[in-house]
Image (cartoon, rainbow, N blue to C red):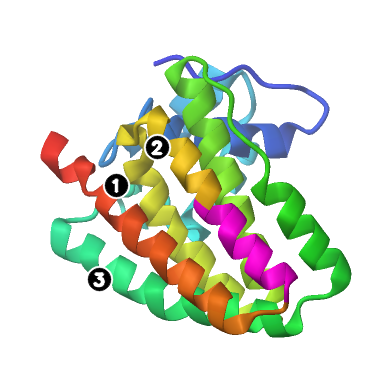
């Protein structure tokens, strides 16, 4: 196992980011045990920031903690669980897009448009997968925040954690399609058009569900 190197300036955050990247890129695979002492040795840190990082990852749903068994990487969803997750995303995120179009501040609208225009450059698997996951989660998070509902933000964030584990199988050529769909959502929110924003989010999530079903064909 080779984890990403750390920057010493913000050790706690760096440990968290390193472990999160290892989980999302399947350097630490779904179901793998995560031994705190072993991870600390690998990262050349004390066990304390590792424990803190694992607690953060647990709160996001990326790892699980069981009595007497310690931490393990959360397993991939079954096909039925995956379908249920997207059903929930359709309920929550379509509402979020509608509310964002109605409630977003001018600064939030401008930020959404700018972020939706960002693209992920090609590169090695680890770099572009990580960048795409971060960018996609950030965009959906901005929509949720613009909806002005903290509870909605928390719910959407936890749902996304499970999707991130499946993104290791996402083909790079689909990122351009995702960007176009994000731009449609952002443009509708910017125009203060709740009907179009909801429709754009629904179309995006419906198409995304089909793209991610490739995960189950590879398993």
Q: Is residue 97 left or right of residue 207?
A: right
The answer to whether the residue labelled 1 contacts the one labelled 2, judged by CB atoms less than 8 Å apart, is yes
Q: Give the secondary structure at mark 2.
A: helix
* Residue 51 appears in the picture as rendered: no
Q: Check disc 1 and report the residue beneath it.
A: 211
What residue do we see at 71% from left, 49% from top?
115
Which is nearer the N-term, disc 1 or disc 2? 2
Q: Check disc 2 and report the residue beneath it.
A: 174
Q: Is residue 97 magenta?
A: no
* Residue 73 appears in the picture as rendered: yes
Distance between the alpha carbons at the discs numbered 3 and 1? 16 Å
Q: Give the secondary structure at mark 3.
A: helix
Distance between the alpha carbons at the discs numbered 1 and 2? 8 Å
The answer to whether the residue labelled 2 contacts the one labelled 3, judged by CB atoms less than 8 Å apart, is no
To which quarter of the image does residue 204 belong?
A: bottom left
The residue mark sitting in front, 2 or 3, is 2
x%, y% of residue 190?
74, 68
What residue do we see at 78% from left, 66% from top?
109
Q: Check disc 3 and report the residue beneath it.
A: 84
Q: Which residues are magenta?
A: 181-191
Which is nearer the N-term, disc 2 or disc 3? 3
Report crowding for label 3: few under 14, some 14 to 19, many 20 or more residues within 10 A (C-alpha): few
x%, y% of residue 70?
36, 47
The residue mark sitting in front, 3 or 1, is 1
Could you say which disc has been placed on residue 4 in the image?
A: none
Q: Give the secondary structure at mark 1.
A: helix
Query: Total number of numbered labels?
Result: 3
């Amino acid at each position: 196992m080779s984890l990403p190197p750390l920057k010493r300036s913000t050790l706690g955050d760096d440990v968290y980011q390193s472990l999160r990247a290892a989980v999302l890129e399947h350097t630490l695979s779904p179901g793998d045990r995560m031994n705190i002492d072993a991870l600390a040795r690998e990262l050349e840190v004390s066990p304390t920031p590792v424990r803190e990082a694992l607690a953060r990852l647990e709160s996001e749903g990326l790892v699980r903690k069981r009595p007497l068994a310690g931490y393990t990487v959360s397993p991939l969803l079954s096909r039925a669980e995956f379908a249920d997750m997207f059903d929930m995303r359709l309920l929550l995120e379509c509402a979020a897009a509608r509310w964002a179009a109605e409630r977003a501040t001018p600064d939030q609208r401008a930020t959404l448009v700018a972020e939706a225009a960002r693209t992920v450059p090609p590169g090695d698997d680890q770099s572009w997968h990580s960048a795409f996951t971060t960018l996609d989660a950030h965009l959906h998070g901005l929509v949720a925040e613009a909806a002005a509902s903290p509870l909605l933000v928390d719910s959407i964030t936890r749902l996304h954690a499970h999707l991130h584990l499946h993104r290791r199988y996402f083909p790079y050529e689909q990122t351009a399609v995702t960007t176009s769909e994000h731009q449609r959502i952002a443009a509708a929110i910017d125009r203060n058009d709740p009907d179009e924003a909801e429709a754009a989010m629904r179309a995006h999530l419906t198409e995304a569900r089909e793209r991610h079903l490739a995960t189950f064909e590879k398993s």
